[in-house]
């Protein structure tokens, strides 16, 4: 029974990471051992769980069904392991965190470094993927997410707000003209951000009680990086909606200029999101406390 459970956990790690070598690294097991045990596990079940290629492995239909069926058991095993770590004096184990790369670089580097220094027995695994990670299926402990939250099965803590404005380079505005009202934006090019789920091509501008919804149609560039979006705006590619905190130094240096400064854009609320478990490990609680204490 113990061997079968161990093999199930090994299978789940390979399925989660889609990589034998990465699963071996995560489990502290040689790649050859993982491959051998995985093949033996498939043979014992009498079914092929993975389609293998030279670069990547993918779950077969049977493998996906098996992964989904054993997921609740794996979560319970993870919770028991976390509870065992909780009994020790200090947080320990592996902490999986996912966040947008640009946001993490600007807001998370300092608190994560301090957390690692204070809790050396915790290994932080930071995923800076732009995709929308499934926290439960991929066993992620904390996700940093901006905007509306739609999954009621997750636990969320408010982290802060991102204030945004329209920005462009002085050179671009000298050539294309400085708009004096929202209607003047229709003649301009835009550098747009493509998020994990949609293109950010609709914005609402507010001035006191007035509201104007804009469709940003003249798209010069679409990009999934806020830092690259800012760089393109600095180089004169067009107007961009950017976080104020990210542009302060560029405005002072004369690289960017705020457009329609007397109008405001909707702020983005940022949350720290965790799986809804009956037990939250000490390592996770400590990490969230670090981020909240540091702030944005």
Image: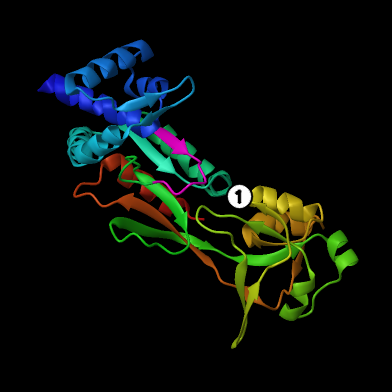
Q: Which residue is mark 1?
A: 224
Q: Is residue 232 above or below residue 68?
A: below
**229 vs 280, nearest the viewer:** 229
Quarter-wise, where is residue 192 in the image?
A: bottom right
Give the residue furthest to the left: 1
Residue 246 in the image: x percent, y percent?
65, 55
Give the residue furthest to the bottom: 209
Q: Is residue 80 left or right of residue 275?
A: left
Q: Is residue 260 above or below residue 91?
A: below
**81 vs 152, nearest the viewer:** 152
Name the residue: 39% across, 35% down: 118
Residue 62 in the image: x percent, y percent?
26, 34
Which span of residues is magenta-colored? 124-133
Q: Is residue 151 above or below residue 10?
A: below
Residue 83 in the image: x percent, y percent?
18, 37
Name the residue: 77% across, 58% down: 252
Q: Is residue 91 visible?
A: no
Quadrant the N terminus occupies? top left
Q: Secondary structure at mark 1?
A: loop
Residue 153 in the image: x percent, y percent?
28, 57
Residue 130 counted in the magenta span = yes
Q: Is residue 195 left or right of residue 179?
A: left
Q: Is residue 3 visible?
A: yes
């Amino acid at each position: 029974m113990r061997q079968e459970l161990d093999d199930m956990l090994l299978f789940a790690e390979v399925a989660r990471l889609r990589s034998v070598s990465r699963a071996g690294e995560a489990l502290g097991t040689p790649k050859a051992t993982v491959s051998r045990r995985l093949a033996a596990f498939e043979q014992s079940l009498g079914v092929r769980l993975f389609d293998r290629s030279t670069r990547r492995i993918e779950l077969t239909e049977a493998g996906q069904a098996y992964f989904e069926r054993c997921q609740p058991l794996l979560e319970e095993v993870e919770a028991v392991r976390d509870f065992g770590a909780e009994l020790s004096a200090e947080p320990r184990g592996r902490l999986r965190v996912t966040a947008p790369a640009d946001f993490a670089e600007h807001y998370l580097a300092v608190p994560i470094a301090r957390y690692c220094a204070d809790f050396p027995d915790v290994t932080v695994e930071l995923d800076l993927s732009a995709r929308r990670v499934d926290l439960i299926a991929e066993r992620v402990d904390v996700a940093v997410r901006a905007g509306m939250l739609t999954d009621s099965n997750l636990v969320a803590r408010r982290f802060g707000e991102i204030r945004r404005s329209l920005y462009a380079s002085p050179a671009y505005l000298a050539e294309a003209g400085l708009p004096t009202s929202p209607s003047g934006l229709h003649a301009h090019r835009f550098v747009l951000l493509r998020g994990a789920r949609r293109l950010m091509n609709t914005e609402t501008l507010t001035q006191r009680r007035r509201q104007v919804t804009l469709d940003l149609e003249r798209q010069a560039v679409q990009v999934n990086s806020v830092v690259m979006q800012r760089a393109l705006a600095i180089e004169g590619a067009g107007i961009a909606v950017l976080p104020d905190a990210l542009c302060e130094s560029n405005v002072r240096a004369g690289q960017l200029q705020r457009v329609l400064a007397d109008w405001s854009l909707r702020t983005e609320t940022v949350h720290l999101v965790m799986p809804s478990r009956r037990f939250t490990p000490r390592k996770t609680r400590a990490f969230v406390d670090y981020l909240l204490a540091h702030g944005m």
